[in-house]
Image (cartoon, grey):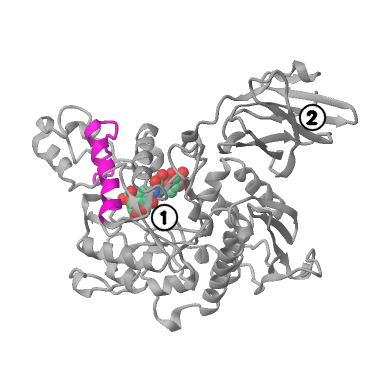
Amino acid sequence: MDIGLQHQSNNPFAYPLGQKVVRLVVQVHRPYRMQEIRVHYGDKYETTYTDVLTMQGAGQGTHFDYFVADVPVPTRRLKYAFEVVLAENVSQWFGEMGWARERDEAVPFYIPYICKRDVFTVPDWVDQTVAYQIFPERFANGNPLLTPDGACGWYDTPTSTSIHGGDLAGIRQRLDYLHELGIRLIYLTPIFRAGSNHKYDTADYFEIDPQFGTKDDLRALVADAHARGMRVVLDAVLNHCGYSFRPFQDVIRNGRRSRYWDWFFIEGDEIDTEAVNYETFATKLRNMPKLNLAHPEVERYMLKVAEYWLEECDIDGWRLDVANEIDHVFWRKFRETIKRLKPDALIIGEVWHNSLPWLQGDQFDGVMNYPLRECILDLFVRGRVTEDEFAKRVTDWQFAYPAQAQRAMLNLLGSHDTERIRTLAGGSVAAVVQAMALLMTAPGIPMIYYGDEIGMQGGADPLCRGGMVWDDDRRDKALLDVVKRLVKLRLSEPALAGGLMRVECAEPGLLRYVREGQTGERVWVQFAAIDRLGAGIPKTARVLFAEQTEPYVAQGEQALAFSEGCAITVWR
Ligand code: ARE
C-alpha cells in the first residue's frame, strides 16, 4: 500500500454540482505507480455498488496529482469507494476507513442526501463577465460643484488625506468608456458618508457621501449601467464603523449609559478615545471602532443596510470588507437576506488567503483572488518561480475550493490596497500584457483595477490611487488596445467561461494550458519565449489572439521570467 491518496466526503473533495451530480476529487501523492483510479458507486441503500467510472487526471499540484470524476446520483443518495488499479488484475481499494484488499472490505464514503438548499449556486452571469474596480474619489469628476474647497489637482500625487474630486456623476459620464472596454461588472469601493477620502470609516450607512453625490445619482448610475448590460457591486464595510457613526458618538457622550455600549468591544467601564481601549480595525485605529455583529441589534441594523441599497438603488451585490474578521453566523444570515431579495446578486468576500470556510455555498460566492495574483506576479513580474512551479501552484489553488466558487472568484492583478502591476513590473508594459493575458484566460471573473488598462503607475497605498488619466496623450493606447482584445476574447469564447485550467506544458520559456468549457469546447493558451515561438501550436489551429511582447531588459533585482519577450497565442 505505497500510494498516498487523499480524499474526504466533503469540500473541497466531494460536493454536489447539482442535485443529481457529485464532483469527486482525489489527490495522489507523487511519486506513485498505478494505472488508473475508478470510482465504484451506487445508491446508499443498495447492497452493492451498481456503477463504475474512471477518474480523469486533472493536473499536477506541488506534491499531488489530481483526479476528478463527476458522478451521476439519480436518487440523490450516494455511496462510493475508489479502486486504485496498480497493474492488470491488481487493485487496492480505498474507502472511509482507509485501504482494503477487497472491494467488500472497503468501508464506503457517503453523501447521505443532496438537499436542494445545500447545493452551492453562484449567479450564472459570472461566467460571462469582466469586472472593473473603481475608487470613486479618483475616477472622474462629473460635478465640480461637489468638489470641496481645498481639493488638490486631479493628477497631483495622492496622499492619505488628499481630495481629488471624483464622484458618481463622473463614473456615470464614463460608462460608455467602460462599455466599450467590454466591462460588465463595476465594483465601487465605499460611497457612504464618511470622513476620509477612501470612505472606509462610515459615518452613515444610509447616506451617500455628499462629495460623491446623492441617492438619485447612484440610482441613475445603476440604471444607466444596467441599460448597457453592466452590473454594479458596492463595498460593505460592516466589520467596523467610523468615528462619527452616531451610535459610537453616543457611547462617547454617554459612556456605559449609552444603549449602544454593547455595539462595540470596549475594555473597562469608560471609553478612552486617546488610549483607544476598544477594538478597532487593525491595531488601535481610533477612527475605525470594531462593531459587535453578534449583538442582535447590530446584526439587524447591518442586514438592513445590505437590503436597503438593493431595494433603493437596485445594486447587484456586495464586496465584503475585512470579511474574515466577521463571524460565519452573520455571513450566513447575510447571504440568506441578499439572495432572498435578489437571487442573482453577487457576494464577494475580501479574504487574502485560503477562503474555504466561506466558500461552502452558505456564505460567499467568491473572494478577491489574491493568491492567484501572487502566482501571476511571481511568474511574470518578480521572476520568482519557474513555469513549472507556477503551474503547480495554480493547480493546487484550483482544487482548494468547490468548482462553483472558482467560477465566481474575483481575479485581480492589483487593487486600491496594492502597488499597481505596471509599477511592480518596473514600468514594463510587456509584463502587464502577459499578466493581463493570463488574467483574462483563467477561470473566474477577471477584474481590471481602474487605470491599469492604460498603463497607470503607482506604488503602495496611497500612491496606487491616483486620478484616472483621461488626457489622451498620457494614456498607453497600445496597451489599451491589447486589453480590449483580451476582454473581447474572454467574453466571446465559451471555453473561457467556467471549467478548469489544465496545464499541458510548463518548462523554461514555455507555458501552455487548455481551458475546457462546460459543454466540451476547448481553447489553448500559450506563453512562449521568443526563441520557442510557434512551439506546440498545431498547423490547423484557429488562432484567436496573438501578441508578441517587447523584449524587456531586467532592471536591478527585477527579472522577468520571459525576459526575452514573449509570444502569447490563444487558439482553438
Ligand atoms: C491607512 C494608510 C495605510 C496604513 C494603514 C494602517 O493609508 O498606509 O498602512 O492606514 O495604519 C482603509 C483604507 C486604507 C487605510 C485603512 C486604515 O483604504 O488606506 O490605511 O483603511 O485606515 C488587511 C486586511 C484587509 C484590508 C487590508 C488593508 O485583512 O481587510 O489589510 N483591506 C480592506 C480594504 C482597505 C481598507 C480596510 C480594509 C479597512 O480593502 O482599503 O483600508 O476598512 C496580507 C494580510 C491581509 C492584509 C494584506 C494587506 O496579505 O494577510 O490580511 O489585509 O496583507 O495588508
Disc 1 residue type?
Answer: Asp
Q: Position of residue 312 (x, y in %)?
A: 25, 54
Image position of 542 with respect to 447: above or below: below
Residue pointed to by mark 2: 84
Residue lying furthest top: 105
Disc 2 residue type?
Answer: Val
Task: Specify whether residue 290 is painted magenta.
Answer: yes
Looking at the rendered structure, the number of numbered marks drawn on it comes to 2
Q: Is residue 42 left or right of residue 232?
A: right
Image position of 181 with respect to 125: above or below: below
| Residues drawn in magenta | 285-312
How far, Cα to Cα, is label 2 from label 1? 47 Å
For disc 1, does the CB lie below 8 Å from ligand 1?
Answer: yes
In the rendered image, the quadrant that contains the C terminus is bottom right
Please tell me which of labels 2 and 1 falls first in the chain: 2
Q: Of the residues tagged 2 and 1, which is closer to the observer? A: 2
Q: Secondary structure at mark 1?
A: loop
Residue 268 showing in the rendered view: yes
Residue lying furthest bottom: 473
Residue 52 versus residue 202: which sits nearer the camera? 52
Residue pointed to by mark 1: 417
Residue at x-position 69% and y-position 43%: 61
Image position of 493 with respect to 106: above or below: below
Q: Position of residue 180 (x, y in %)?
A: 46, 74
Residue 557 versus residue 201: which sits nearer the camera? 201
Q: Secondary structure at mark 2?
A: strand
Q: Position of residue 456 (x, y in %)?
A: 46, 70
Magenta part, dominant SS = helix
Residue lying furthest right: 88
- In the rendering, which numbered label is found on residue 425? none
